[in-house]
C-alpha cells in the first residue's frame, strides 16, 4: 500500500513579500505614508549630491562614495518610516478592542519597563480593563475604556500599590473614547515621557513586590504587533 504523505504546512512568505504586503496595507490606510517615505528616501540623496559637489568637487571617487552613502541612508530611513507608519496603522485597527493596551505593552515598550499583556483587573460586564506598568517613572496604572467606568478600578489598584510600595510614585493614564484620553498609538511614547524617579534596580524590586497583585483572566488578548508580519486585508 502506498503511504499517504502528510500535507506540507503552508510556506511562509519571504521577507521581501512581507514588506510589500506591509507597504500595500499601509498605503491603503495611511494616505501620507507614501509621500513621507519618498521624502525620507530622496532627502539624503539630495544632501549627498550637494556634499559631493561643494565638498569634493572634481573627485569622482569621493562623489560616488557620497552618493552611495546617501542612497543607503535613504533606504534605511524609508524602512524606518515604513515600520513606524505600519505600526500606527496596525494600532488604529485594533484600537477600541479588548486587550489592545496589552498588545502595546508587550510589543512597544523599552526593556526598562516591566509590564504584562494581561490586565490585572477586568470588568466582566463591560470588558473594561486596567493594566499596570512599572518603569523608571514609577508605577503607571492604565485604564482601557471610558474614564467614568475605569476610574474606580484604577483607584482600587492605586490603593493596593500604595499599600505594598508606599513610597513609589503612581501615575494614571486612560486609553479610551474620552477627548483627553491617550491614543493607543501614542501610549508607549507617553509612558516614556513621564518623569523618572526610580533606578533600574528599583524598577525590578518594585515589580517583584507587585507581582502578588496579578490575577489570571480569560479575556482574549490580541498578540503583539509586528509590522513586518502584518498582512494586507483581502480585497472584497
Image: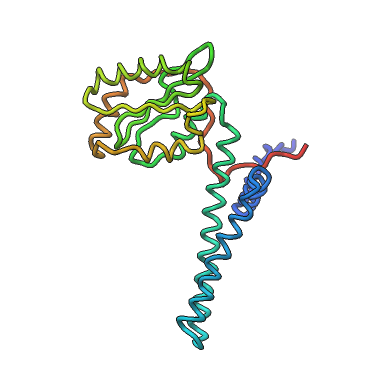
Which is more toward the observer, 67 or 6?
Answer: 67
Give the residue at x 36% y 41%: 111
Looking at the image, the residue that sits furthest to the left is: 167
Please state the horizontal and vertical placement of residue 18, each as a whole percent of the image.
Answer: 62, 49
Looking at the image, the residue that sits furthest to the front is: 179
Report the number of numbered marks.
0
Give the residue at x 45% y 81%: 55
Residue 97, by quadrant, is top right
Please state the horizontal and vertical placement of residue 218, each as a whole percent of the image.
Answer: 50, 18
Which is more toward the observer, 188 or 207?
Answer: 188
Which is more toward the observer, 121 or 159?
Answer: 159
| 189 w.r.t. 173: above or below | below
| 85 w.r.t. 57: above or below | above
Looking at the image, the residue that sits furthest to the bottom is: 58
Please state the horizontal and vertical placement of residue 9, each as a whole percent of the image.
Answer: 65, 40
Left/right placement of residue 168 relative to residue 194 reads: left
Which is more toward the observer, 224 or 96?
Answer: 96
| 124 w.r.t. 196: above or below | above
Q: In this figure, which colouring scheme has been used for the structure?
A: rainbow
Q: Quadrant of the C terminus?
A: top right
Q: Quadrant of the N terminus?
A: top right
Left/right placement of residue 166 relative to residue 85 reads: left
Please state the horizontal and vertical placement of residue 234, each as a whole percent of the image.
Answer: 72, 39
Left/right placement of residue 140 relative to residue 54 reads: left
Give the residue at x 35% y 18%: 157
Looking at the image, the residue that sits furthest to the right is: 236
Amino acid at each position: 500500500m502506498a503511504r499517504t504523505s502528510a500535507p506540507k504546512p503552508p510556506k511562509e512568505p519571504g521577507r521581501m513579500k512581507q514588506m510589500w504586503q506591509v507597504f500595500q496595507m499601509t498605503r491603503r490606510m495611511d494616505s501620507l505614508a507614501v509621500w513621507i517615505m519618498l521624502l525620507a528616501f530622496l532627502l539624503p540623496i539630495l544632501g549627498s549630491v550637494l556634499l559631493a559637489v561643494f565638498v569634493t568637487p572634481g573627485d569622482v571617487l569621493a562623489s560616488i562614495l557620497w552618493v552611495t552613502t546617501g542612497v543607503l541612508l535613504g533606504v534605511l530611513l524609508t524602512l524606518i518610516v515604513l515600520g513606524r507608519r505600519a505600526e500606527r496603522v496596525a494600532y488604529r485597527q485594533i484600537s477600541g478592542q479588548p486587550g489592545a493596551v496589552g498588545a502595546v505593552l508587550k510589543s512597544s515598550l523599552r526593556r526598562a519597563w516591566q509590564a504584562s499583556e494581561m490586565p490585572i483587573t477586568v470588568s466582566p460586564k463591560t470588558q473594561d480593563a486596567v493594566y499596570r506598568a512599572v518603569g523608571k517613572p514609577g508605577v503607571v496604572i492604565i485604564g482601557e475604556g471610558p474614564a467614568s467606568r475605569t476610574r474606580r478600578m484604577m483607584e482600587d489598584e492605586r490603593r493596593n500599590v500604595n499599600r505594598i510600595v508606599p513610597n513609589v510614585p503612581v501615575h494614571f493614564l486612560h486609553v479610551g473614547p474620552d477627548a483627553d484620553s491617550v491614543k493607543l498609538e501614542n501610549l508607549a511614547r507617553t509612558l516614556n515621557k513621564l518623569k523618572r524617579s526610580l533606578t533600574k534596580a528599583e524598577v525590578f524590586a518594585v515589580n517583584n513586590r507587585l507581582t502578588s497583585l496579578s490575577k489570571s483572566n480569560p479575556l482574549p488578548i490580541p498578540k503583539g504587533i509586528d509590522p513586518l508580519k502584518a498582512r494586507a486585508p483581502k480585497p472584497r
